[in-house]
Image (spheres, rainbow, N blue to C red):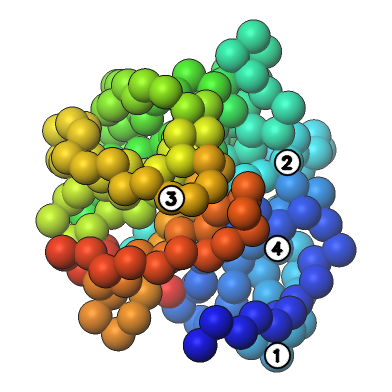
Amino acid sequence: EGRAEIFFNTGGIPNGAKFHENGDLYVADRKCGIIAISPQKAVRVIADRYHEEKFNGPNDLVFDSQGNLYFTDPEGSSAEEPYGRLYRISSSGEINCLASGLAYPNGLVLSHDERCLFVAITRKNRILRYILDPPPFRSYIFSQLSGGWGPDGMAFDAMGNLYVAHYGGGAVLLLNPKGELLERIPLEGMHPTNVAFGDRDRRALFVTEAETGSVYRFKTEHPGLPLFG
């Protein structure tokens, strides 16, 4: 209905958010780390450091079907100083660094079979595909974009097509399972930051856009891939 209200103030700088199946909202907060907010608005810190070293500033996160959490930690990294990291927190709470030396790792999504993890590398204007299964853990360039600053948030539809918020490009990009551009969906602002499927049939894509401070919504041909929460 177009109305907005404050759900919770983290006291930090919240970025990406995903629901856990238990109803908690997990948030990648640039200042607070990874936090969880219950439906009753009780907050707890899941992780804010790795081996006693504070995170640079988490950006986005995604659950797999077992409740394991993957998240990016890019703050301050760049093409010239690529020290961004990719982490995994197991459902039992164990934290592992999966990759480092990244030029601002940003949005991330899992493939339908959860054998691949796709990560937006904003400062390289590309999307990497990490192979989780079978090991060893390794990466390939899934798509090299052009124009704009680089990819930000992402979401898969049920057919394996990837919707990408192209920050600085003023559009949401639709890529096929091979990483090829199918469609460019322009927005009024130049800085789309994230995308998420909604509505009961998951055929509505919601897009946040920072330049105009707006949330856009449009219908998609295929429903979004169901998420853990």
Cα distance in 3D space between marks 2 and 3: 28 Å
Q: Which residue is mark 1?
A: 40
Q: Is residue 198 above or below residue 103?
A: below
Cα distance in 3D space between marks 3 and 4: 31 Å
Q: Nearer the viewer, mark 3 or mark 4?
A: 3
Q: Is residue 130 above or below residue 208?
A: above
Q: Nearer the viewer, mark 2 or mark 4?
A: 2
Residue 110, horizontal then vertical, whole percent: 33, 49
Q: Is residue 35 above or below residue 28?
A: below
Residue 202, horizontal then vertical, whole percent: 28, 74
Residue drawn where x is 27% and y is 27% of the image: 142
Which kind of residue does numbered mark 3 sit on? Leu
Q: Quadrant of residue 11?
A: bottom right
Which kind of residue does numbered mark 1 sit on? Gln
Q: Which residue is mark 2?
A: 57
Residue drawn where x is 37% and y is 30% of the image: 127
Which kind of residue does numbered mark 2 sit on? Gly
Cα distance in 3D space between marks 1 and 2: 26 Å
Of pointers 4 and 1, the one earlier in the residue sequence: 4
